[in-house]
Image (cartoon, rainbow, N blue to C red):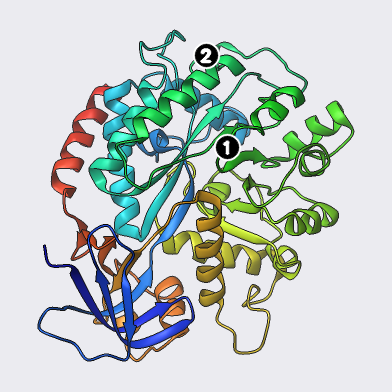
Amino acid sequence: MRPVQLWFERALLPEGWASHVRFRFPEGLPPAIEAGVAKSADDEIHAIAVPGLANLHSHAFQRAMAGLTETAGPSSDDFWTWREMMYRFANRIGPDDLEVIAALAYMEMLESGFTRVGEFHYLHRSPDGSAYADPAEMSARIAAAAAETGIGLTLLPVFYAHSGFGGAAPNAAQKRFVQSIDEYAVLSARCREHLKSSPGAVLGLAPHSLRAVTPDELAELEQLPGPLHIHVAEQTKEVDDCIAWSGLRPVQWLLDHASVDARWCLVHATQMDEAETKALAESGAVAGLCPITEANLGDGVFPLSEYLAAKGRFGIGSDSNVRIDLCEELRLLEYGQRLARHRRNVVAARERQSSGGVVFRAALAGGRQALGGVEFDLVSLDASHPALEGREGDALLDSWIFAAAGNVIDCVWRNGRKLVANGRHRDRVRIAARYRQALRRLLS
């Protein structure tokens, strides 16, 4: 079989922007990359290439409830009232539903420019709380959805044992999530088996939060291999409850009591003081930021400027999947800083530095670190889009992220395999039709 050859007028490479770039993808091998070469008859010709980004934090099933929680309740709404609605919705979802919903979410991620997803997955049990015959049945459906769409998968099965700090017993609404340490070991082993048929898939682990694990359980989980992700310090109530339990703020407690290093991803970390921000940056861990969800849930604004000044690493995720839009995540990340600080171009640290270039490159590096896997993924941008006219270099990223309306993405490849063409996933019609049928059942 002839290797796939792609030629671009301009491409963003690790060393910077280059012109007249060919990517050659031999079967099963890393691509050969040549810059400054003329196009040939064997090349598929495109204009602008950028790397695909990692979506480091997703709860795929929540895509099906997007837009259903935007009406006010009888009292003040916050994360905790949203969570109760999410629990009720989660109890409707069976294995077939999960696979269909995840396929739609992953298809939309690819169309948006995400080429790997970190699935923070906690729907392990059946709706009545009993175990499936295969303890990893729901994880297998996540893997099937990733394989169907072609997105890279880092599966992060969640350990969830408690409803609050100090080992509080789980409540009835959490019965689908709960595992013992021994059950989690079996779950992880089964997940590993299911991922064997998915080239490039990575298995990590995810203690849900300091609310949901005890210190002893966290210490045991740390011994397992793979990327380690945890929710932390998303809400002010979480901070207050952690202080009441331990005398410490959540990020401070975690840094003091766990071996937090480059394998860790602390998701949200929205509520940090100055000392925590600096210490997290120095740990080498990745902060997993989800600006759309954090705005939707009223979480607050991550202290990004101070964190970057301390050389902190971050990636982005779509979390609740209320809206799947890579550019909107990056745009809102910078705009949130501007709103909080009353100035412009906050993440750009020096004169004439591109805000879009900073957030894109940082999210690229942080996402790859947090999810593992070896990626050779490309996204082509439509050079005929009005927002990109006359742009070169990082001005292309600025205009794509901050100025473009409508889909700028033309094609998406994973390891030379084209998954998106003309802005649409190759199986969009079929995946969307199955999703609509599933939603009619779930909402009836």
Residue 77 visible in the current orientation:
no
Q: Is residue 79 left or right of residue 92?
A: right
Please give the name of the residue rendered at 39% of the width and 59% of the height, measured from the top-left corner.
Answer: 375
Q: Is residue 103 left or right of residue 129?
A: left
Residue 425 picture location, percent across and down? 21, 54
Query: What label sits on residue 175 in the rendered view?
Result: 2
The residue carrying mark 1 is 225
Q: CA distance from mark 2 to mark 1?
A: 26 Å
Q: Is residue 246 left or right of residue 292?
A: right
Q: 280 or 33: nearer the eye?
A: 33
Residue 420 picture location, percent across and down? 22, 59
Please give the name of the residue rendered at 56% of the width and 17% of the height, measured from the top-left corner.
Answer: 179
Quadrant of image for the N terminus: bottom left
- Label 2: state its secondary structure: loop
Amino acid bearing label 1: Pro
Label 2: how many residues lie within 10 Å, few (<14), some (14-19) or many (20+)?
many
Query: What label sits on residue 292 in the rendered view?
Result: none
Please give the name of the residue rendered at 18% of the width and 34% of the height, measured from the top-left corner.
Answer: 434
Determine whether 235 is above or below 214 in the image.
below
Q: Quadrant of residue 170?
A: top right
Q: 57 or 224: nearer the eye?
A: 224
